[in-house]
Image (tube, coloured by chain):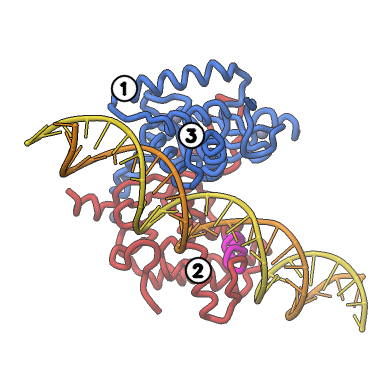
Chain colours: A red, B blue, C orange, D yellow
Amino acid sequence: MAGPEGRGTPAAGGAVAFAAHDHAHCTGEGMARAEALSAASGARLTPVRRRTLEILLQSHCALGAYEVLERLAAEGFGNQPPVAYRALDFLVEQGLAHRIRRLNAFAACMHPGEAHSPVFFICRACNAVAEAPAEAVRRATEAAARGIGFTVERTTVEALGLCPACAEAGA
Amino acid sequence: MAGPEGRGTPAAGGAVAFAAHDHAHCTGEGMARAEALSAASGARLTPVRRRTLEILLQSHCALGAYEVLERLAAEGFGNQPPVAYRALDFLVEQGLAHRIRRLNAFAACMHPGEAHSPVFFICRACNAVAEAPAEAVRRATEAAARGIGFTVERTTVEALGLCPACAEAGA
DNA sequence: GTCATGTATGTAATATCATAACATGTCAAG
DNA sequence: CTTGACATGTTATGATATTACATACATGAC
Ligand SMILES: [Zn+2]
Ligand SMILES: [Zn+2]
Ligand SMILES: [Zn+2]
Ligand SMILES: [Zn+2]
């Protein structure tokens, strides 16, 4: 129902991409890709999981587990934390969503399927979040790891700063 | 009193550096640098703050705020969460400690003073943590940021994987 | 000195995030 | 129809973090 909203002020948003664009398209596209990937991998995209992904895509924001839970519960799914955490963990494992640790929140992946090591850019003024592929960052991290004999399996890269809109407004 | 210990099993550690080395030296050296930097910048390294840094340096591990609090309280400082969080936040702001989000923990900085954008390597088997400078990672992140008009102020880079010891043991 | 001001600390209460443990339901293979 | 694997629901609790307010301490005017 509601447009993009979530963490941060409603006015400011918390959008997963900075540029304006067609949300409905994102959502439809995202669900279609998720379906395809799940079918291919044999992962079971059950009703709660599917709906959880839709919620993330529709909100187009980073949402806390309890925000997701609220929406799920309002639609007749369980209303206890594990319901949301389990669905979210599944999505993260399948590469359909990401966890953003600085915000204690989750966001639908903008590039599912493609092998990617995303960087998240988080605006400290409006809480908007953008996911960008960053192969170069991954390579640099692994180079540093080799120097100390560490084997990298996953990396979390989150940058805090100002989105284009807030930088302009603040200037 | 106790040697290095904290998050994770006492046996396994959670050390802030993988290689064996002289803890006492680290601690003394670390406190001396902290003193010098605080004097230079005018920051007030008060008793709680000073002791908090010592605790991090001595433990030589990533410690949770409540673990730090426990130790502070045992020495007569306040025993409520804000006491620990305030001291830890101060240290992080001054660049004397880092917050490790994946572990909900804090660790003394191994390279205070030097401008650095650290990468943390976290062993998923033994919880050991190593801090490594990674200028190349910062540059790659900023390059990606420029592409979308984002202004980076701080970055968090945490890599999960296997430390040399655990990789060998597991192999 | 003492007064006002800013900063640091102490404490109580509460908010927020996350998981453990167990019960119930669903579905397909045997 | 039973069994086993997996998903979901629910209760309870644990772990992490912050708000709000009270108190103490420093510093610099007056
Ligand atoms: Zn992604
Ligand atoms: Zn912004
Ligand atoms: Zn450091
Ligand atoms: Zn290890």
Q: Quadrant of ligand 4?
A: top right
Report the side of B162 relative to A29 (left or right): right
Do we see residue A134 in this rendering? no
Amino acid type of disc 1? Ala
Q: Is residue B47 above or below residue D24?
A: above
Residue name at image x 38 percent, y 23 percent: B114
Q: Is residue A75 above or below residue B71?
A: below
Question: Label 1 crowding class (10 Å Cα cut-off): few <14, some 14-19, many 20+?
Answer: few
Q: Which mark is residue A57?
A: none
Magenta part of the protein: which range? Answer: A83-91
Could you give the CA–CA distance between mark 2 and mark 1, rounded to whole angstroms?
A: 47 Å
In the image, D4 versus B74, the foreground residue is B74
Indicate the position of residue B86 as horizontal and vertical percent values.
41, 42
Residue name at image x 42 percent, y 18 percent: B32
- Same chain? Circles 2 and 3: no
Residue name at image x 32 percent, y 46 percent: A161
Could you give the CA–CA distance between mark 2 and mark 3, rounded to whole angstroms?
A: 31 Å
Quadrant housing the C terminus of chain B: top right
- Location of mark 2 (residue): A68
- Location of mark 3 (residue): B119
Amino acid type of disc 3? Val
Asked whether residue B103 is drawn in magenta, I would say no
Could you give the CA–CA distance between mark 1 and mark 3, rounded to whole angstroms?
A: 27 Å
Indicate the position of residue B102 as horizontal and vertical percent values.
54, 45
- Location of mark 1 (residue): B39
In the image, A30 versus B41, the foreground residue is B41
Indicate the position of residue B165 as horizontal and vertical percent values.
69, 28
Amino acid type of disc 2? Val
Name the N-terminal-most of marks 1 and 3: 1
